[in-house]
Amino acid sequence: AQTVTQSQPEMSVQEAETVTLSCTYDTSENNYYLFWYKQPPSRQMILVIRQEAYKQQNATENRFSVNFQKAAKSFSLKISDSQLGDTAMYFCASDTGNQFYFGTGTSLTVIP
Amino acid sequence: GAGVSQSPRYKVAKRGQDVALRCDPISGHVSLFWYQQALGQGPEFLTYFQNEAQLDKSGLPSDRFFAERPEGSVSTLKIQRTQQEDSAVYLCASSPSWPGTDTQYFGPGTRLTVL
């Protein structure tokens, strides 16, 4: 069975600093997508960034970037220049085309 | 165009009642997913449609849960004889293409409370 593990239930970061959220996954598939979603208190799940497993280059979206280590099955999210609006739950997710799994989430608080 | 919408946003049901939750996906999206999110947890997969075909319902927790998408657009998740353990947020997501190839876009969810 495939699982997604987020080992940091809660994290905090000072405004303008950098923070890294961890995620590991387990799959026997070779092709799959990995995602980071943000869920603010309003509960609307918003895509932050996605990575296609067959691409070696790490995805970046403005202040957000990932460190994708396929062999280690690791997919961490780095948020640079943290802003107050980044405060939210962050979920790591995988999609193999047959299975869809989310981690249990990391609650990130950006401190002014 | 508009994003994924869900209605109602909040639903309170007495134990034993039947409920129906609606999802309007983004127009033209092929795939539609339902998830259940318990308080403080990540979403858990319930079922998936490709157009009108329900290709995977392995995540439905019991035969009291039923989903349909008869015309390949709007979907309804129905829960019969609701139980307290059914209390959760039910999320709908749609995707423009096949699973494993594209992003899922989520609706705001329906918070179901069973008393």
Image: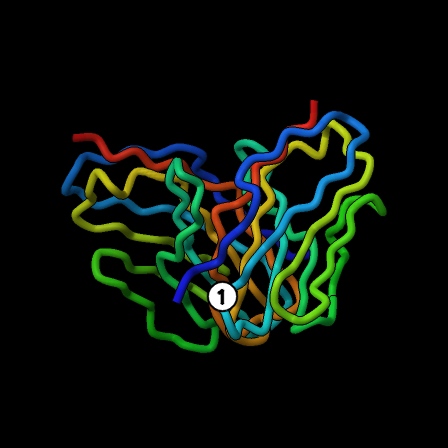
Taking A63 as reference, is A8 above or below it? above
Chain designation of label 1 = B
Query: Residue A23, how many percent across, how many down?
Result: 45, 50
- Quadrant for the N terminus of chain A in the image: bottom right
Taking A53 as reference, is B47 above or below it? above
Question: For the residue carrying disc 1, how many other residues have a C-alpha within 10 Å: few (<14), some (14-19), or many (20+)?
Answer: many
Observer able to see residue B113: yes
Residue A101 found in image quarter: bottom right
Observer able to see residue A71: no
Residue A58 found in image quarter: bottom left
- Quadrant for the C terminus of chain A in the image: top left
From the viewer's perspective, tell me whether residue A30 is left or right of residue A111: right
Q: Residue furthest top?
A: B115
From the viewer's perspective, tell me whether residue A82 is left or right of residue A2: left
- Mark 1, secondary structure of its residue: loop
From the viewer's perspective, tell me whether residue A112 is left or right of residue B23: left
Determine the residue positioned at 47% across, 72% down: A53
Query: Residue B19, how many percent across, how many down?
Result: 72, 40
Q: Nearer the viewer, residue B60 or A54?
A: B60
Query: Residue B70, how many percent across, how many down?
Result: 72, 67
Which residue matches tag 1?
B26
What's the amino acid at mark 1? Ile
Determine the residue positioned at 80% across, 40% down: B80
Q: Nearer the viewer, residue B96 or A109?
A: B96
Determine the residue positioned at 52% across, 74% down: B28
What kind of colouring is applied to the model shown?
A: rainbow
Taking B1 as reference, is A104 above or below it? above
